[in-house]
Amino acid sequence: MSDTPLIPARPAPRHPGGPAARVRAWARRHLFDGWASTLATLTLLAAAAWALPPLFDQALLHAVWRADLDACQAARGSGACWGVITEKHRLIVFGRYPLEEQWRPALATAGLFVLLVASGVRRCWHRGLVLAWGLGLAGFFVLMGGGLAGLAPVPTDRWGGLPLTLMLSTLSIALAFPLAVLVALGRRSRMPAIRTLCGLYVELVRGVPLISVLFMASFLFPLFLPAGTSPDVLLRVLAGISLFAAAYLAETVRAGLQAIPRGQAEAAASVGLGWWATQRLVVLPQALATVVPGLLNSFISIFKDSSLITIVSLYELTGSLGLALNGDPVWRPFLIEGYVFITLIYFVICAAMSRYSLWVEQQLARSQVR
């Protein structure tokens, strides 16, 4: 053995200076990293210093918070009228749902939110979650539609607001994602017929806007059915959004499949795995992990695109706002405050989805390091 003495162990390095030093280091790295970054930061700070004080003054200091029409009219031009939200929030959030029964969509929406949050928590990822989703969706439709357990029936054309937006987005994603995976696999199939059909479906759907798909599903599709038979408009809209979203998701999934080296499938085949087992256990998990940001972008887009269903007389959150204020000439001048309100709702939900995407990416990066 060598007589050279070993270097004694040293403690792990620590960030010097405590929290203040960490903040300075973060600002130097993200805000003042070079002259271009410094110039952009100073420009944005100057713009904020110019725009924020009058905005703060109008939105908060001189704003009217109570549902007082005279006070809102007196404050026009100098302060916002948040009293319109106090006056119209139930119609905005729940649409044309009967006023005396609005506890039902409130309870149904709360249950759906709980299921969505539980689906994002790793501790809840077990078979019981599938059962909970089945019971939760059944409870949602029972509460919204009624006709059971002594609940008064409410037709689907009276559903609206946040419950309709959340339900359509959730079910569209749940229906579109499995179809997208199958279409993506079909586009990489060695069978020409399957590959051509899947490619034709994707190109046809991506070649038209969603609004035309909704129009066809709502007005043209019933013309091809026997007289007297027409599915509910909500089912037709759900099918249209799901098929449209599946085409875009399929291309995202296909990009992930193309990123996986051929050697992964060859290694799976060498240990005796069949084609379906190889895709399910080896290829698809890696492919989906590669395209997590693209998938979440598509999910957010589906959530926001649900606002287009207003053209078929289903009043989701944006349509309910127009129904609440455009039809009331007294409160119509304060439409901007209503749009700010629903913008905050959209922002909170989309920001939560974005943060969850970042968390999933961090977990995947940690698993790859291991």
Image: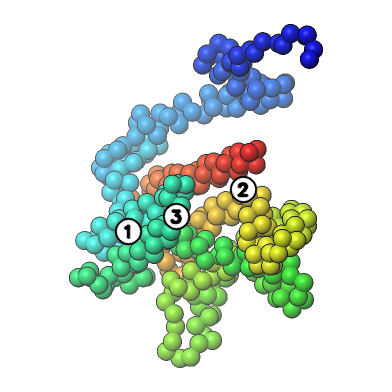
How far is the residue under mark 2 from the one under mark 1? Answer: 29 Å
Residue located 32% across and 64% down the image = 139
Q: Secondary structure at mark 3?
A: loop
Label 3: how many Cα within 10 Å (few below 14, some 14–19, many 20+)? few
Q: Amino acid type of disc 3? A: His
How far is the residue under mark 1 from the one under mark 3? Answer: 23 Å
Residue located 74% across and 78% down the image = 193
Among the two numbered marks 1 and 3 on one chain, the one whose residue lies closer to the N terminus:
1
Residue located 74% across and 70% down the image = 189
- The residue where tag 2 is placed is 293
Quarter of the image where one finds residue 186: bottom right
Foreground label between 1 and 3: 3
How far is the residue under mark 2 from the one under mark 3? Answer: 24 Å
Q: Amino acid type of disc 2? A: Pro
Residue 108 numbered mark, or none: 1
Viewer-nearest residue: 161 or 66: 161
Residue located 66% across and 57% down the image = 282
Q: Relative to 330, is 164 on the left or the right?
A: right
- The residue where tag 3 is placed is 126
Q: Secondary structure at mark 2?
A: helix
